[in-house]
Image (spheres, helix red, strand yellow):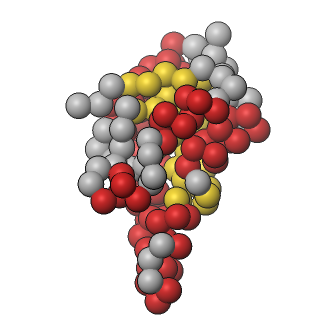
C-alpha cells in the first residue's frame, strides 16, 4: 500500500513518537522512509540583520541532528532511509516534497515547537499540510 513514507520533523521532542509510527509503517510495507527538515526562512528573516546568519546556522544544525535521528531509527527498523533538508515555508515545502518524490503517506505530529517558536510559525504546520496534501496524512497525537 505504501512505497514511500515521509516523516516531517522540526527537531522537537515529540518527533520521536511520530518517527516510531513512520518507521513501523515503512518496515511493515517494505517502503522507503523519507525524513524532511525544513529550515523555516521566516524565522531567520525575522531576526535582526546582523544575527540572521547565526539563526539560520542554528536551525540547520538542529536539522542535521533531527535528520541523523531519522537515519538511525530507519536503520534500526531495517528500512531504506533518505533524508533531506530544505529551506522555505514548512507546510509548502512538505507538500511540494510529497508530490515531487511520490510520497504515499505523510506522518506528522499534532504539534511541534512551543512558546515563541510556535507563535512565530503563524499557525499549525500540520493543519496546513492536512489542507494542502494530495496524499493521506497520518497525524500522531503528541502529549
Residue 1 position, x and y percent, is 64, 10
Residue 93 or 123: which is nearer the viewer?
Answer: 123
Residue 139 position, x and y percent, is 44, 25
Q: Residue furthest bottom?
A: 50
Q: Quadrant of the C terminus?
A: top left
Q: Is residue 34 above or below residue 84?
A: above
Asked if residue 68 can be seen in this view, the reply is: no
Q: Is residue 66 above or below residue 25?
A: below
Q: Is residue 57 above or below residue 108?
A: below
**Residue at image coords 60%, 20%:** 136
Q: Quadrant of residue 36?
A: top right
How many labels were placed on the picture? 0
Residue 37 position, x and y percent, is 52, 50
Residue 91 or 18: which is nearer the viewer?
Answer: 91
> In the displayed structure, does residue 82 sit left or right of residue 55?
right
Residue 11 position, x and y percent, is 39, 50
Asked if residue 122 can be seen in this view, the reply is: yes
**Residue at image coords 70%, 41%:** 96
Q: Is residue 141 above or below residue 59?
A: above
**Residue at image coords 76%, 38%:** 100
Residue 132 or 88: which is nearer the viewer?
Answer: 132
Q: Residue furthest left?
A: 143
Q: Residue furthest top?
A: 1
**Residue at image coords 36%, 43%:** 112
Q: Quadrant of residue 103?
A: top right
Amino acid at each position: 500500500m505504501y512505497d514511500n513514507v515521509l516523516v516531517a520533523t522540526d527537531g522537537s521532542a515529540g518527533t520521536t513518537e511520530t518517527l516510531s509510527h513512520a518507521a513501523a509503517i515503512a518496515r511493515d510495507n517494505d517502503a522507503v522512509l523519507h525524513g524532511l527538515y525544513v529550515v523555516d526562512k521566516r524565522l531567520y528573516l525575522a531576526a535582526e540583520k546582523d544575527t540572521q546568519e547565526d539563526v539560520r546556522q542554528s536551525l540547520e544544525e538542529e536539522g542535521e541532528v533531527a535528520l541523523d535521528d531519522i537515519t538511525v531509527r530507519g536503520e534500526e527498523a531495517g528500512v531504506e532511509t533518505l533524508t533531506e533538508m530544505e529551506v522555505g515555508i514548512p507546510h509548502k515545502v512538505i507538500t511540494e516534497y510529497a508530490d515531487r518524490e511520490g510520497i504515499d503517506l505523510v506522518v506528522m505530529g499534532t504539534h511541534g515547537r512551543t512558546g515563541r517558536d510556535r507563535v512565530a510559525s503563524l499557525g499549525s504546520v500540520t493543519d496546513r499540510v492536512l489542507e494542502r496534501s494530495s496524499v493521506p496524512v497520518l497525524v500522531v497525537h503528541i502529549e
